[in-house]
Image: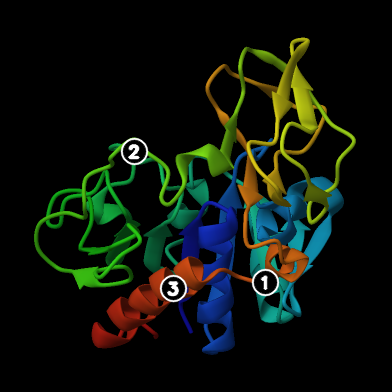
């Protein structure tokens, strides 16, 4: 059995990893040494900080080395390896690379990185830096697989109500005492960065927040308020992540990249 490498451990990448795992495939995640996931409660990147982390009953564990990653995968876990340069691909044991970092711009992934390279969202061009692209823009085409062209261009605007996305007003260390899934009120202080306060734009549930104590840049997304006001949504893979993951599964199975 060949392996699938998922580049990134955020909520969309984790949804992809879960669906691949549940389909019986061996998945390894490569991550940064200090991930900045906003939806931390459904992101396997948390294993980098905690040593292990579970989402919807699927368990991930931080791998201490390349060999450890393969060993953990054989044990039925999803290994999360600090490997931003994806040097693990040199092992030549992967049939698929999924770049799920959602950079929304061209990155360093190459079409020759694996027999099948799948890009998620903007920043990819079929036949150039990937073989296939899965649409990540919410709407009629969400989760569709493209074997030609590119995905929808990045609009630069959050999907839905743009007020729901909380951004850092300055560079500095993020401080907050509010927990993800807490209900918040309009004007309530959610966090502080560099002495500047970030407040809730409306009533809702704090759906995501970057890990407190981490330094962030000005303008970076640091949180997300969900007006649906249901805390349970904070602990389950989103409909968007599942749709994108379904596209990845389609691409993998249609090219028979399993052995």
Question: Is residue 167 found left or right of 212 in the rendered image?
Answer: left
Question: Is residue 83 found left or right of 152 in the rendered image?
Answer: right
Viewer-side residue, 221 vs 7: 221
Work out whether residue 150 can be spotted: yes
Image quarter of residue 15: bottom right
Q: Position of residue 221 (x, y in %)?
A: 56, 33
Residue 245 tag number: 3
Q: Position of residue 232 (x, y in %)?
A: 75, 70
Eye-nearest disc, 3 or 1: 1
Q: Secondary structure at mark 2?
A: loop
Give neighbour class at mark 3: few <14, some 14-19, many 20+ (Cα, 10 Å). Answer: many
Image quarter of residue 153: top left
Eye-nearest disc, 1 or 2: 1
Name the residue at 49% across, 47% down.
86
Task: Kindly check if marks 3 and 1 are in contact, taking CB atoms under 8 A apart as contact.
Answer: no
Q: Secondary structure at mark 3?
A: helix
In the picture of the structure, the residue carrying the numbered disc 1 is 236
Placement of 81 over or under 229, stated as above or below: above
Question: What's the CA distance linking mark 3 and mark 1?
Answer: 14 Å
Name the residue at 84% across, 55% down.
51
Sequence-wise, the earlier of marks 3 and 1 is 1
Question: What's the CA distance linking mark 3 and mark 2?
Answer: 22 Å
Name the residue at 16% across, 54% down.
150
Image quarter of residue 147: bottom left
């Amino acid at each position: 059995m060949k392996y699938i490498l998922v580049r990134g451990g955020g909520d969309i990448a984790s949804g992809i990893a879960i669906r691949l795992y549940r389909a019986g495939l061996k998945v390894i995640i490569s991550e940064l040494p200090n991930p900045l996931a906003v939806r931390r409660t459904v992101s396997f990147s948390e294993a980098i900080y905690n040593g292990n982390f579970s989402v919807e009953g699927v368990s991930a564990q931080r791998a201490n080395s390349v060999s450890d990653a393969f060993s953990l995968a054989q044990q039925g876990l999803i290994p999360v390896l600090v490997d931003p340069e994806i040097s693990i691909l040199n092992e030549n044991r992967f049939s698929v690379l999924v770049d799920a970092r959602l950079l929304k711009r061209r990155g360093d992934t190459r079409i020759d990185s694996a027999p099948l390279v799948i890009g998620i969202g903007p920043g990819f061009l079929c036949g150039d830096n990937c073989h296939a692209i899965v649409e990540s823009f919410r709407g009629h085409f969400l989760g569709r697989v493209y074997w030609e062209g590119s995905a929808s261009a990045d609009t630069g605007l959050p999907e839905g109500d743009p007020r729901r996305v909380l951004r850092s007003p300055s560079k500095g260390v993020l401080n907050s005492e509010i927990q993800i899934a807490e209900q918040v009120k309009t004007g309530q202080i959610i966090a502080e960065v560099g002495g500047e306060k970030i407040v809730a734009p409306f009533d809702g549930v704090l759906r995501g927040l970057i890990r407190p104590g981490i330094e962030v840049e000005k303008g970076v997304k640091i949180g997300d308020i969900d007006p649906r006001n249901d805390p349970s949504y904070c602990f389950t893979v989103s409909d968007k992540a599942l749709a994108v993951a379904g596209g990845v599964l389609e691409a993998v199975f249609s090219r028979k990249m399993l052995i």
